[in-house]
Image (cartoon, rainbow, N blue to C red):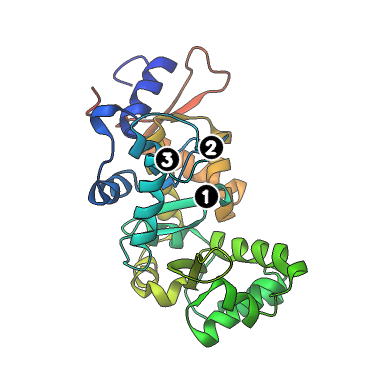
């Protein structure tokens, strides 16, 4: 490591990477897209216990709690730009990392897909269901989209047989299951339901077929290394538990995670170092401080 790292230095670099500075704040939809492309993947807003960049704080230009007021300027821009980009194939938006709203660059999305358990066929869900890896409700939702095409939430609940009030929580859990499994994603907003606001959903392979084709060219082990490398470049330093927690949704085995970290250490992409003030050794990307100010 070219310099001795401290917790203060890590925090300073994260502020730069996350654009939590007034001189680096995201001020336009174009800059929002640029930010997502630069970090590769991030959360939509800050998530407690998760170390990741997020679009909301990049727009605010500082770390701040998520406001309750819908007319908050930072939240309004964040929400509006996200909604306007749905369906435009500018980025991926869906509940993914930590099962929370996540944005992924379209350059990085094939890597996520290659690192997941998906094989890329529209009918693969049947094998998962028969193996007990997919809930019945998720199967019904997926099949409704497969048969009828993109549907907003109200219609989707009805077509999946989950429109009753007592079925709402089951529908929500199943939709989260499909989103975090990279099978279904929001592709638009419809004026439907009580609040005249409902996401329209579609199947990922159908909405972004090029992602699946690109993913076929990437080995799972290569994809895992690329994601961990990008993550550490963004957050600068993280212990092994933090890395495992971040990518848990992709269902990597402990052996796969250990091999991924070992490969990056061997390639000298990352180092594992002790940092004063932190109880666990930290994995640090060797290029994490390049270009910092």
Image point (38%, 64%), residue name: 86
Residue 279's place in the image compared with 27, above or below, is above
Q: Are marks 2 and 1 in contact (CB under 8 Å)?
A: yes
Local packing at callout 1 (Cα closer than 10 Å; few below 14, some 14-19, many 20+) is many
Residue in view at x 39 percent, y 59 percent = 83
274 in relation to 290, above or below: above
Judging by the rendered image, the residue that carries numbered circle 1 is: 97
**Could you say which disc has been placed on residue 50 in the image?**
2
In the rendered view of the protein, which quadrant contains the N terminus? Answer: top left
| Lower position in the chain sequence, tag 3 or tag 1 | 3
x, y percent for residue 21? 30, 27
Element class at badge 1: helix
Gap in Å between the C-alphas at discs 2 and 3?
23 Å
Decide: is 37 above or below 13.
below
- Is 170 left or right of 178, judged from the image as shown? right
Question: Could one spot residue 6 in this view of the protein?
Answer: no
Q: Position of residue 6 (x, y in %)?
A: 41, 15
Please provide percent x and percent y for residue 220. 46, 59
Residue 255 is labelled as: none
| Residue 277 image position (x, y, % from top left) | 52, 13
Task: Work out whether mark 2 precedes mark 1 in sequence or the reverse, and give the earlier one.
Answer: 2
Q: Is residue 252 left or right of residue 120?
A: right
| Label 2 or label 3, whichever comes before in sequence order | 2
Pick whichever, 2 or 40, lies toward us: 40
Secondary structure beneath dot 3 equals: loop
Q: Which residue is mark 3?
A: 72
Which residue lies at the image location 57% right of the left edge and 69% below the top edge?
Answer: 193
Q: Which numbered disc, 3 or 1, marks the residue closer to the eye?
A: 3
């Amino acid at each position: 490591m070219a310099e001795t790292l401290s917790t203060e230095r890590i925090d300073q670099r994260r502020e730069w990477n996350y654009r939590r500075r007034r001189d680096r704040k995201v001020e336009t939809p174009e800059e929002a897209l640029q930010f997502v492309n630069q970090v590769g993947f991030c959360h939509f807003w800050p998530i407690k216990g998760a170390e990741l960049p997020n679009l909301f704080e990049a727009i605010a230009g500082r770390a701040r709690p998520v406001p309750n007021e819908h007319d908050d300027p930072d939240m309004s821009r964040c929400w509006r730009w996200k909604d306007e980009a749905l369906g435009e194939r500018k980025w991926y938006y869906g509940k993914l990392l930590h099962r929370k709203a996540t944005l992924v660059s379209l350059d990085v999305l094939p890597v996520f897909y290659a690192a997941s358990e998906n094989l890329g066929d529209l009918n693969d869900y049947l094998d998962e269901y028969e193996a007990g890896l997919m809930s019945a409700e998720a199967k019904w939702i997926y099949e409704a989209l497969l048969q009828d095409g993109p549907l907003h939430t109200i219609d989707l609940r009805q077509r999946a047989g989950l429109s009753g009030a007592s079925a709402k929580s089951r529908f929500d859990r199943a939709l989260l299951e499909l989103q975090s499994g990279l099978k279904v994603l929001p592709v638009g907003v419809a004026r439907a339901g009580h609040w005249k606001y409902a996401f329209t959903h579609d199947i990922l392979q159908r909405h972004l077929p090029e992602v699946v084709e690109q993913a076929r060219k990437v080995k799972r082990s290569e994809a895992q290394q690329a994601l961990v490398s990008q993550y550490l470049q963004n957050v600068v330093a993280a212990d092994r538990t933090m890395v495992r927690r971040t990518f848990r949704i992709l269902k990597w085995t402990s052996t796969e995670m250990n091999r991924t970290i070992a490969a990056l250490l061997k390639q000298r992409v990352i180092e594992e170092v002790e940092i004063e003030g932190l109880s666990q050794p930290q994995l640090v990307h060797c290029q994490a401080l390049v270009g910092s100010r």
